[in-house]
Image (cartoon, rainbow, N blue to C red):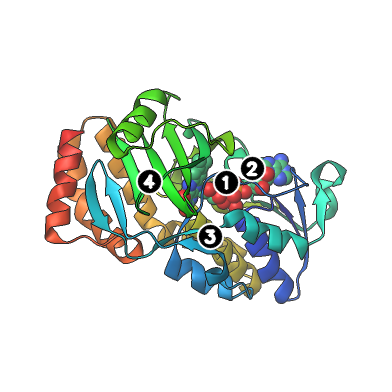
C-alpha cells in the first residue's frame, strides 16, 4: 500500500517516520518547502511527547528549551507538572532533512492508495467543515526579563493572551481571540506581568487554530483521504494541539498497520473524549451557561492534572474563582 501525506507539520512528519519504519511506501509533500512553520506553538506535554517521539528515534530532551516552574493565569500560579517549551522549529528542521519533501504543486493526488490530510487548520483535502471554529491568533518573539513561567491573561471566555519562555531572555508573546480582538488581551497581559511593548522584536506572524472538537470535524475519512491531527480537531479547549496531533497520527498508524482502517474514527473519538469535554465546557461558558458547565470541571481538572498542571484543592478553588469572575 502506498501512502501520501500532505503537510509536514507535527502530525505529518511523525506519521511519515512511523510508516517508513514499518516498511510502508510513504511520501510527503508540503506547501512551504523552504523551512517548517515556526508559529509560536512550542509548549508540549512532556511525558506523552517524549514517549511518542522515542518511537521514531527522536530524543525530545535535545529540543527542550525551558521547563517553566508555574503556569500563571490572571496572577494565580498553578504548579507546572509536565509542560515544557521545546524548539519545535529545530525539531521539524532536523526531521525535514531526513525526508524527501515533494512540492505540493508538482504532486498528482491520484498517485497513492491513501492520501493523508495533515494540513492542520487548512484541512486542504477533506471537505470544509460547516460552522468551523478557526480562532485568529497573532504572535511575536520578544526579549524580556521575567521569571521563566508560562503567563496567561484572559478576560471573558473568547480568548487569551500568553507568554512562553524560550530561554536567553526570549519569549513567545501571543494572543488568540474568536473575533480577532487582540489589543485588550495583549495589553492586559503586558500590564499584568510587566511585558512592556518593546522594540526588540525578532519576528511577528499570524495564524489560525481550530478549536472544534473531533466529533464536529467528521468525516475523518472520505474515499481514500484520511485526516490526521488538527485537520480533524485534535486540539484541546485551551489550544494544545502538539501532543494530541502526535497521538492522533499514532492511532492512524496503528489502524493502518492492523488493517483496521474502519476502526480509526471510533478510536480517535474514544481517545479524545477529554478534548470533547474541554470544548463542551468552553462552549457552555461562552454561552453564559455556567451552571451547566461547572459539573464538567472535575473531569477536566482530573485529566489536566495528569497531563499538564497540578491542581491542589486550593488550586481548584482559585480556578473556580477565575471562571466565575470571567
Ligand atoms: C499561535 C498558536 C500557538 C499555539 N501554541 C500551542 C502550544 O503552545 N502547544 C500546543 O500543543 N499547541 C499549540 N498550538 C496548536 C498546535 O500548533 C497545532 O494544533 C499543531 O501544530 C497541529 O499539528 P498538525 O501537524 O496537525 O498541523 P500543523 O502543525 O499546522 O502542520 C500542518 C502543515 O501542513 C502544511 N500545509 C498546509 N496546507 C497545505 C497544503 N495544501 N498542502 C501541503 N501542505 C500544507 C503547513 O504548511 C504545515 O506545515 C498553537 C497554535 C497556534 C496557531
Reading the image, the residue beneath label 1 is 231
Is the Cβ of the residue at disc 1 closer than 8 Å to that at disc 2? yes
Q: Nearer the viewer, residue 94 or 277?
A: 94
Q: Earlier in the sequence, mark 3 or mark 2?
A: 2
Q: Does the residue tagged 1 have its C-beta within 8 Å of any atom of ligand 1?
A: yes
Q: Earlier in the sequence, mark 4 or mark 1?
A: 1
Reading the image, the residue beneath label 2 is 126
Secondary structure type for disc 2: loop
Q: Earlier in the sequence, mark 1 or mark 3?
A: 1
**Residue in the image at 39% along x and 30% along y:** 186
Reading the image, the residue beneath label 4 is 238
Number of the front mark, 4 or 3: 4
The answer to whether 49 appears left or right of 316 in the picture is right
Determine crowd level at label 1: few under 14, some 14-19, many 20+ residues with C-alpha closer than 10 A: many
Determine crowd level at label 4: few under 14, some 14-19, many 20+ residues with C-alpha closer than 10 A: few
**Mark 4 to mark 3 CA distance (whole Å):** 18 Å
Secondary structure type for disc 3: helix
**Residue in the image at 31% along x and 53% along y:** 71
Q: Nearer the viewer, residue 137 or 142?
A: 142
Number of the front mark, 4 or 1: 4
Q: In the rendered image, is residue 239 in sight?
A: no
Reading the image, the residue beneath label 3 is 248
Q: Earlier in the sequence, mark 1 or mark 2?
A: 2
Is the Cβ of the residue at disc 3 closer than 8 Å to that at disc 2? no
Q: Earlier in the sequence, mark 4 or mark 2?
A: 2
Amino acid at each position: 500500500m502506498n501512502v501520501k501525506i500532505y503537510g509536514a507539520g507535527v502530525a505529518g512528519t511523525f506519521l511519515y517516520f512511523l510508516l517508513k519504519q514499518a516498511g510502508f511506501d510513504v511520501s510527503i509533500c508540503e506547501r512551504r518547502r523552504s523551512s517548517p512553520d515556526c508559529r509560536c506553538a512550542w509548549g508540549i506535554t512532556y511525558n506523552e511527547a517524549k514517549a511518542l517521539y522515542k518511537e521514531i528515534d527522536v530524543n525530545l530532551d535535545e529540543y527542550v528549551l525551558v521547563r517553566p516552574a508555574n503556569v500563571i493565569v490572571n496572577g494565580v500560579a498553578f504548579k507546572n507538572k509536565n509542560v515544557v517549551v521545546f524548539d519545535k522549529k529545530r525539531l521539524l528542521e532536523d526531521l525535514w532533512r531526513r525526508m524527501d519533501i515533494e512540492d505540493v504543486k508538482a504532486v498528482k493526488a491520484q498517485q497513492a492508495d491513501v492520501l493523508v490530510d495533515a494540513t492542520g487548520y487548512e484541512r486542504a483535502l477533506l471537505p470544509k467543515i460547516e460552522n468551523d471554529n478557526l480562532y485568529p491568533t497573532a504572535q511575536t518573539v520578544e526579549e524580556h526579563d521575567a521569571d521563566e513561567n508560562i503567563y496567561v491573561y484572559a478576560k471573558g471566555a473568547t480568548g487569551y493572551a500568553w507568554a512562553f519562555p524560550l530561554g536567553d531572555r526570549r519569549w513567545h508573546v501571543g494572543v488568540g481571540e474568536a473575533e480577532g480582538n487582540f489589543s485588550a488581551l495583549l495589553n492586559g497581559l503586558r500590564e499584568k506581568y510587566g511585558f512592556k511593548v518593546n522594540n526588540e522584536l525578532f519576528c511577528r506572524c499570524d495564524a489560525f487554530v481550530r478549536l472544534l472538537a473531533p466529533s464536529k470535524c467528521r468525516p475523518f475519512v472520505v474515499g481514500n483521504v484520511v485526516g490526521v491531527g488538527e485537520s480533524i480537531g485534535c486540539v484541546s479547549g485551551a489550544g494544545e494541539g502538539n501532543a494530541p496531533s502526535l497521538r492522533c497520527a499514532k492511532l492512524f498508524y496503528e489502524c493502518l498497520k492492523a488493517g483496521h482502517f474502519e476502526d480509526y474514527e471510533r478510536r480517535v473519538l474514544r481517545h479524545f473524549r477529554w478534548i470533547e469535554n474541554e470544548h463542551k465546557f468552553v462552549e457552555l461558558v461562552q454561552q453564559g451557561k455556567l451552571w451547566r458547565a461547572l459539573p464538567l470541571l472535575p473531569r477536566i481538572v482530573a485529566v489536566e492534572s495528569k497531563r499538564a498542571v497540578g491542581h491542589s484543592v486550593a488550586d481548584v478553588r482559585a480556578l473556580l474563582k477565575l471562571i466565575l469572575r470571567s
